[in-house]
Image (cartoon, rainbow, N blue to C red):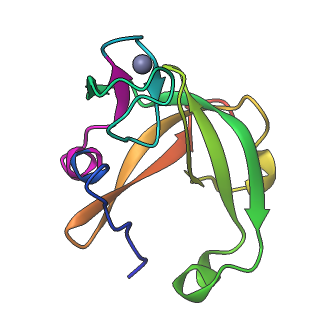
């Protein structure tokens, strides 16, 4: 099985909500900054009044690479796309773009989140919006 992330105390709730199919971002109740990765202090103002808010799961490709030599269990899936996705709510996260032709990925490509089951955990992956590739 492909690996899953190991949550830290700061990211445990974020991963737990992914496990039930909900993507969230951290939100500062003091300055309204939305950010990832989740952490107990706002990187904008230092406030500890930080919580998680649900997001749409829609975003676009900010940057990407096509990996032709994946390590371990990823080798059989090569070539595959590793990307930075900018969510429409602002924060970015790194993930895979699940697409038949990796060369179809481009900057600004509209994508949406899907949840891949891996054992007892889920992992956030992205797929192109219908009709974009
Ligand atoms: Zn803040």
For the question of whether residue 32 can be seen, the reply is yes
For the question of whether residue 55 can be seen, the reply is no
Left or right: 50 as drawn, with respect to 45: left
- Indicate whether residue 19 is drawn in magenta: yes
Residue lying at 30% horizontally and 49% vertically, measured from the top left: 10
Q: Which residues are magenta?
A: 14-28
Residue lying at 22% horizontally and 44% vertically, measured from the top left: 17
Residue lying at 68% horizontally and 58% vertically, measured from the top left: 81
Q: Quadrant of residue 109?
A: top right
Return the residue nearer the eye: 116 or 9.
9
Image position, residue 19 (x, y; %): 22, 53
- Indicate whether residue 99 is drawn in magenta: no
Residue lying at 73% horizontally and 55% vertically, measured from the top left: 101
Q: Quadrant of residue 1?
A: bottom left
| Depicted 100 relative to depicted 126: above or below | below
Image position, residue 24 (x, y; %): 33, 33
Return the residue nearer the eye: 123 or 104.
123
Image position, residue 36 (x, y; %): 47, 37
Which image quarter has ligand 1?
top left
Instruction: Looking at this view, name the residue that lies furthest to the bottom.
Output: 72
Return the residue nearer the eye: 39 or 17.
39
Image position, residue 87 (x, y; %): 53, 28
């Amino acid at each position: 099985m492909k690996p899953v992330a190991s949550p830290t105390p700061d990211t445990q709730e974020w991963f737990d909500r992914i496990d039930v199919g909900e993507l969230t971002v951290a939100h500062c109740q003091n300055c309204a900054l939305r950010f990832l990765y989740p952490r107990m202090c706002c990187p904008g103002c230092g406030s500890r009044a930080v919580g998680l808010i649900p997001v749409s799961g829609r975003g676009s490709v900010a940057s990407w690479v096509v990996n032709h030599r994946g390590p371990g269990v990823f080798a059989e899936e090569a070539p595959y796309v590793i990307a930075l996705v900018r969510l429409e709510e602002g924060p970015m996260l790194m993930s895979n773009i699940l697409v038949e032709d990796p060369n179809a990925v481009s900057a600004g490509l509209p994508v949406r989140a899907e949840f891949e089951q891996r054992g007892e955990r889920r992992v956030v992956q992205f797929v192109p919006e219908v009709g974009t590739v």
